Image (cartoon, rainbow, N blue to C red):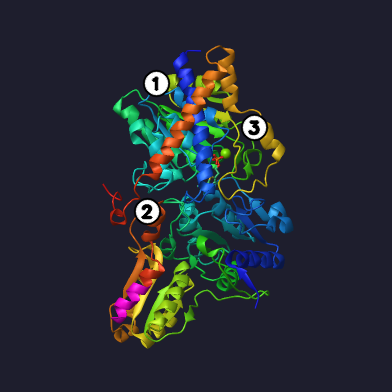
Amino acid sequence: MRKITYAEAIREALRQEMRRDENIFLIGEDLGIYGGAFGVTRGLINEFGEERVRDTPISELAIVGASLGAAITGMRPVAEIMFMDFITLAMEQIVNQAAKMKYMFGGKAKVPMVIRTPAGSGTGAAAQHSQSLEAWFTHVPGLKVVMPSTPYDAKGLLISSIRDDNPVIFIEHKLLYKTTGEVPEEEYEIPLGVADIKRKGEDLTIIATSIMVQRAISASKELEKEGISVEIVDPRTLKPYDKKTIIESIKRTGKVIIVHEACKTGGFGAEIAAIISESESFDYLDAPIRRLGGLDIPIPYNRNLEKNAVPQIEDIIKAAKELIGK
Amino acid sequence: MELSREKLIDMLGKMYKIRFFEEKVDYLFSLGLVHGTMHLSIGQEAVAVGAVSALKSDDYILSTHRGHGHCIAKGADINLMMAEFLGKETGYCRGRGGSMHIADIKSGNLGATGVVGGGIPISTGVGLSIKMRKTGQVVLCFFGDGAANLGAFHESLNLAAIWKLPVIFLCENNMYGMSMSVKKAVAIKDIAKRADSYGFPGEVVDGNDILAVYEFVLKAVKRARKGEGPSLIECKTYRWKGHSKSDQNLYRSKEEIGSWKKKCPIRRFKEKLISKDILTEEKVKVIEEDAKNIIEKAVDFANNSPEPSVEEIFEGVYS
Ligand SMILES: Cc1ncc(C[n+]2csc(CCOP(=O)(O)OP(=O)(O)O)c2C)c(N)n1
Ligand SMILES: [Mg+2]
């Protein structure tokens, strides 16, 4: 099958969906001629024009608010917040308004909107351009939270997110944009709330999100050489999440490591650990649940410090060996 | 002109230091020696130096992602700036902040922020503190044209107005917020006009004329020190380089960039000082060479400085 990058997969989903439904439009900073800070929307303005690839001033709160207003009156906006860090400026409209509107109004409002935003460190952009804030949004009923780790998932999940009638926070990763993978040319949906087993294995389950899926895959290749067989589960969507796939995997392997880039304290890994503890899979565990997450520090600028602030392939290998007792 | 000869010469020297510093870090970036990205203010030096020259040394500034000029104008040690760029332990932020986050609390530089408009609300708090502590200082808050469209801008200007805070809001209008032309982002001609709606003066200044910037800021500083409240000053200028390292300059023409290069603020000031017999071409050469040497020494300092240690990675999160 044809291989394209993660950024291209997202662009293709946007393009195909915009062709299918003219109520879909893009709104955000520097999306048009600039093509977005990471080039994801490059070229779309040529096909769809300024009306539907709508550049805004630097006004994050109004970007989300305008999306919300448009969404409840018949449009299907896909907003972009240039860096996840700046979603903080739009929290009021996301958390108090968009998330609550349907329920608060007795189920009558419909809020079909997507907020795309890149998270993550590794680009040397330091504390205010490197955060992974997904856990905050899982804490707010009414929002869906999606975190693709491959080009294939990015396309299918984005199409589903756009077709969903709820506000979706779609979290991309800067370091994944240039990664490549097989992606069908036609449109396809990946349902929100279905995890994917990225690799089958027997000795140990690694539950990883976003870029950590890729690091876990690299780690598992190394571990395989030493006779350790790793199963990798990617929840793909944190809300809704797929309890069943996680639990079934642990029942098979009896050991689990949870890896995410976000700070470990209060990270989504804690939620996954709790889900496991509350489920029947707990009885199958023959070692404590292990969590790997970012250090509880702002992301530092220095290359080496930055690398040490979040889990790397070696950290996953080390944790796996410790858990297996090798 | 109330400026002494020495001060004028110092101002020109600072402009050169900013220009050469940025040319150097741009070059170091091209060699892969600087991590991350950077935002250069080449072409905007008159704003930083003109504005800060109207302050006293114990006054405060707040800076932006495009802040190297602000730092140097406020008297930053170039060695420590360069070390920060190279992520070294000796840098202003121990290698933790980088280009976008240089702060030098000692010189009254309360820091640069990577979040557009992030410094504007902070400046009202600094103004409030000055007022409550009755120190007679002022705070000057730099921000771009793009930042003026955030809620933070409007909330802060109103707050500073009703409490008559000693804040100078200095908008560096370099015509673009990333690729967004100010003509598309703002429906009025001058951002300075927004001051009207909050009830304090707003002025438009030629931001490539360092002495005009100085004069207008000085007026605002005097007003602030007298307890009469804030001012908004909009300096019209232009950024010669791309927004950051990901910019392909597709949203503006070569001709436009070229026409602004002809209005180089440094050349303009230099020629003025020569025509007033304050400097000669030869003396300017010496000033230029001195500035270059300082930058070269800073590169040596940074190269010879140690990396931060991973063992200390948790240091500085809490007091
Ligand atoms: C709140 C926020 N939104 C978006 C960005 C991304 N960004 C960084 S600088 C910039 C343009 C800023 O324009 P302006 O305020 O005019 O300053 P200039 O870069 O022109 O100096 C943008 C959009 C950001 N850093 N912060
Ligand atoms: Mg600007």
Asked which secondary structure carries label 2, the reply is loop
Q: Which residue is mark 2?
A: A298
Q: Which residue is mark 1?
A: B225
Residue drawn at 45 percent across, 36 percent down = B296
| Image location of residue A48, percent across then percent down | 72, 58
Q: Which residue is mark 3?
A: B261
Q: Are marks 1 and 3 on the same chain?
A: yes
Q: Compared with residue A52, is residue B262 higher up or lower down, i.e. above or below?
A: above
Which callout, 1 or 3, points to the residue nearer the camera?
A: 3
Q: Quadrant of ligand 2?
A: top right
Q: Which residues are magenta?
A: A317-326
Answer yes or no: is residue B187 visible: yes
Return the disc, 1 or 3, that comes first in the chain's sequence: 1
**Within the image, what quadrant is residue A8 found in?**
bottom right
Q: State the residue in front, B150 or A235.
A: A235
Chain ID at mark 3:
B
Asked which secondary structure carries label 3, the reply is helix
Q: Are marks 3 and 2 on the same chain?
A: no
Query: What type of secondary structure mainly makes up the magenta span?
Result: helix
Q: Compared with residue B119, is residue A120 higher up or lower down, i.e. above or below?
A: below
